[in-house]
C-alpha cells in the first residue's frame, strides 16, 4: 500500500454548498496540508474521511479500509489519531486521569508513551481539562492522538490559536512522527506558514472544489510573483498568469512555470531594458491562496 488515504470523487451536498468530486491521496510517509478560506470545505473533507457523516457520492479508503458512515467495524480507527480544534475530553477530568478513559477506547493505548508526552509538553497532571489554557488543551489532544498505534494523524485546525513557540514545537513532533516512512499526517489549517513549513504536499480547496494538489517544493519552485507596472503586466503571456493584484503604485502578478516565464520574450526584453525594471519574487503558500482565491472571485 502506497497511500494511507485515498479519496475518489467525494461529493457532499449541504444547502448552498457542495463538496464537488474531490479526489486526492495521502502517500504514506508524507505530510499533506489542506488550505482554504473559511467555509471552503476543509472540515467537511476531514469529517467525510473519518466517516463521521454520510456522503452523497464517491469513496474513501483509509489504510485500505473502505470507510462508511455509521459502520459497526471500527478497528481501523485504532490506527488513526484525530485532533480537532476543540478538546473533546470531559472538562471535569484531571489530566492524570485521562489514561483511564483512553485505555478503554484503544487496545493499543501506550501509557508510557503518553506520560513521556505529558512531561515533554509540561502538562500539569493535577489540573482539570477545563482549567487548562487553549495551548495546553491542544497539546493534551495531540499527546493522546500519538499515544495509541496511530499510523495516520488527521488534524483539523489543530494549530490555530496556539502561539508561534508552541506551534513550532508541535510541528516538529509531526515531522518526527513521519520520519520512519511508515506514518502520515493530514492537516488542515488557516495558518499557511505552518502548512508551508511542514507539508510535503499542499492541497487548496475553494468553495468545495480542489483547485490544487501539488508537491510543495515544486509549487514554491514553479510559482513566482512578478512586481511590475500595469503596462508591463499586460504584456505577460496570459497562459502563465494565475492571478493579479493591483494598487496605486504597483501591479503584482502570480505566474506559474517560472522557468518558462524566464524564456518568454516579455522577460528577455524587460531584462535587457535595465536591472530594476521589474522584480521576480518568491511566492509563498499564502500568496498562492490569496491570488488563486481572488482570481476565482473576479
Ligand atoms: N452540518 C452542516 N449542515 C449544513 N451545512 C454545513 C454543515 N457543515 C458544514 N456546512 C457548510 O459547508 C460549508 C463548508 O464548511 P466547512 O466547515 O467544511 O468549511 P471549512 O473550510 O472547514 O471552514 P472553516 O475554516 O471556517 O472551519 C459551509 O458553507 C458550511 O456552512
Image (cartoon, grey):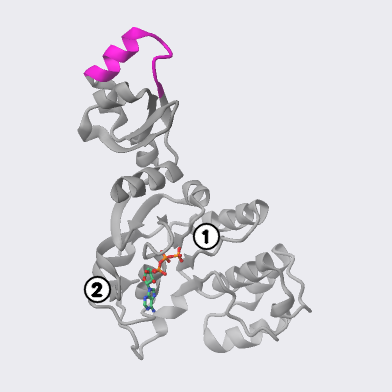
Is residue 274 located in the magenta-colored stretch of the structure? yes
Left or right: 230, with 31 as reference point = left
Secondary structure of the residue carrying numbered label 2: strand
Number of marks in picture: 2
Q: Earlier in the sequence, mark 1 or mark 2?
A: 2
In the orientation shown, which residue stands out farthest toward the top? 273
What crowding class fits label 2: few (fewer than 14 Cα within 10 Å), some (14-19), or many (20 or more)?
Answer: some
Q: Quadrant of ligand 1?
A: bottom left
Residue shown at 64%/73% (left/top)? 114
Please determine whether, in this image, residue 59 is positioned above or below residue 181.
below
Region in magenta? 265-279
Name the spot of residue 9 as percent of width and height, x first: 22, 67
**Labelled disc at residue 225:** none
**Label 1 belongs to which residue?**
177
Left or right: 128, with 37 as reference point = right
Please determine whether, in this image, residue 86 is positioned above or below residue 284.
below
**Labelled disc at residue 59:** 2
Q: Of circles 1 and 2, which is in front? A: 2
Amino acid at each position: 500500500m502506497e497511500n494511507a488515504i485515498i479519496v475518489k470523487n467525494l461529493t457532499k451536498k449541504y444547502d448552498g454548498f457542495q463538496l464537488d468530486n474531490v479526489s486526492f491521496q495521502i502517500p504514506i510517509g508524507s505530510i499533506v496540508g489542506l488550505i482554504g478560506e473559511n467555509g471552503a470545505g476543509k472540515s467537511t473533507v476531514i469529517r467525510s474521511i473519518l466517516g463521521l457523516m454520510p456522503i452523497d457520492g464517491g469513496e474513501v479508503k483509509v489504510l485500505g479500509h473502505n470507510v462508511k458512515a455509521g459502520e459497526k467495524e471500527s478497528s481501523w480507527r485504532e490506527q488513526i489519531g484525530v485532533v480537532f480544534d476543540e478538546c473533546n475530553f470531559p472538562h471535569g477530568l484531571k489530566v492524570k486521569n485521562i489514561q483511564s478513559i483512553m485505555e478503554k477506547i484503544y487496545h493499543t493505548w501506550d501509557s508510557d508513551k503518553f506520560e513521556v508526552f505529558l512531561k515533554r509538553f509540561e502538562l500539569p497532571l493535577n489540573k482539570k481539562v477545563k482549567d487548562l489554557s487553549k495551548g495546553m488543551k491542544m497539546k493534551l489532544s495531540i499527546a493522546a492522538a500519538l499515544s495509541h498505534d496511530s499510523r495516520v494523524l488527521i488534524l483539523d485546525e489543530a494549530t490555530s490559536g496556539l502561539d508561534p513557540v508552541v506551534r513550532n514545537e508541535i510541528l516538529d513532533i509531526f515531522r518526527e512522527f513521519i520520519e520512519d516512512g511508515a506514518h502520515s499526517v493530514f492537516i488542515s489549517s488557516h495558518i499557511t506558514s505552518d502548512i508551508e513549513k511542514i507539508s510535503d504536499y499542499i492541497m487548496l480547496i475553494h468553495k468545495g472544489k480542489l483547485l490544487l494538489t501539488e508537491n510543495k517544493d515544486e509549487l514554491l519552485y514553479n510559482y513566482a510573483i512578478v512586481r511590475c507596472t500595469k503596462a508591463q503586466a499586460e504584456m505577460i503571456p496570459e497562459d502563465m498568469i494565475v492571478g493579479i493584484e493591483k494598487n496605486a503604485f504597483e501591479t503584482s502578478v502570480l505566474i506559474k512555470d517560472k522557468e518558462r516565464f524566464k524564456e518568454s520574450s516579455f522577460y528577455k526584453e524587460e531584462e535587457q531594458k535595465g536591472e530594476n525594471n521589474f522584480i521576480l519574487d518568491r511566492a509563498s503558500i499564502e500568496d498562492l491562496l490569496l491570488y488563486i482565491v481572488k482570481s476565482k472571485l473576479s
